[in-house]
Amino acid sequence: MTHYVDPEREQFEAFKALPRDVPVMMLNLVRFRDRAAYPDGREATGAEAYAAYGRDSAPVFQRVGGEIIWRGKPELMLIGPARKRWDLIFIARYPTAGAFLEMVTDPVYRKAVKHRQAAVLDSRLIRTGEIDMGAGFAS
């Protein structure tokens, strides 16, 4: 089974090639490790390590204008593989894609991300753009 924690270079380059001056929402699906995998061997659960990531990265996230616009705890996979499980799903909104890039290249953030890398067993991060709401699903 393949696990995804960090973007591959090709995916990151594709992200950078998209417009940077538009708002983006980043859909996050996260599965924690039972025990965090810190290189220095420190003890923590995956959830504890992810909380440390949130705490340490929050000043940069807020400075660039990021905000969590929705957060939820998955309860049941209604459509999709039943054995695929996520511990946390949330949507982070950034005023521009450039703000997201500013965040992930900030030195404070780069130090904080070690907690995310230790915490996460598997994840998905999907860039989405805003569209008009319309009246139905396909509008």
Image: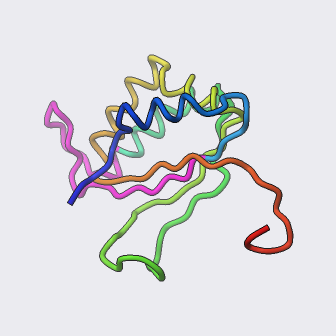
Which residue occupies the foreground of this view, 56 or 120? 120
Which corner quadrant of the image does residue 76 belong to? bottom left
Give the image location of residue 11, x and y in percent.
43, 38
Quadrant of res 100: top right
Q: Is residue 120 left or right of residue 75?
A: left
Residue farthest along the right direction in this orientation? 135
Depth check, front residue: 2 or 120 = 2
Q: Is residue 130 above or below residue 95?
A: below
- Residue that extends furthest to the top in the rendered view of this protein: 107
Q: Nearer the viewer, residue 13 or 91?
A: 13
Residue ID at (82%, 57%): 132
Q: Outermost residue toward the left?
A: 41
Q: How is the image coloured?
A: rainbow
53 magenta-colored: no
Residue for point 47% across, 80% down? 79
- How many numbered circles does the render carry? 0
Residue 49's place in the image compared with 62, above or below, is below
Residue 107 drawn at (x, y percent):
44, 17
**Horizontal side of residue 90 vs 8, given as left or right:** right
Would residue 111 be found to the left or right of residue 2 on screen? right
* Residue 52 rendering spot, x and y as whole percentages: 39, 39
Say which of 69 and 81 sits in front.
81
Residue occupying image coordinates x 39% and y 34%: 10
Image quarter where the C terminus lies is bottom right
As drawn, 126 above or below 72: above
Q: Residue 59: where, in percent of width, then height?
A: 57, 28
Which residue is located at x 18 percent, y 37 percent? 42
* Residue range highlighted in magenta: 26-49
Above-or-below relation of 77 to 103: below
Image quadrant containing the N terminus: bottom left
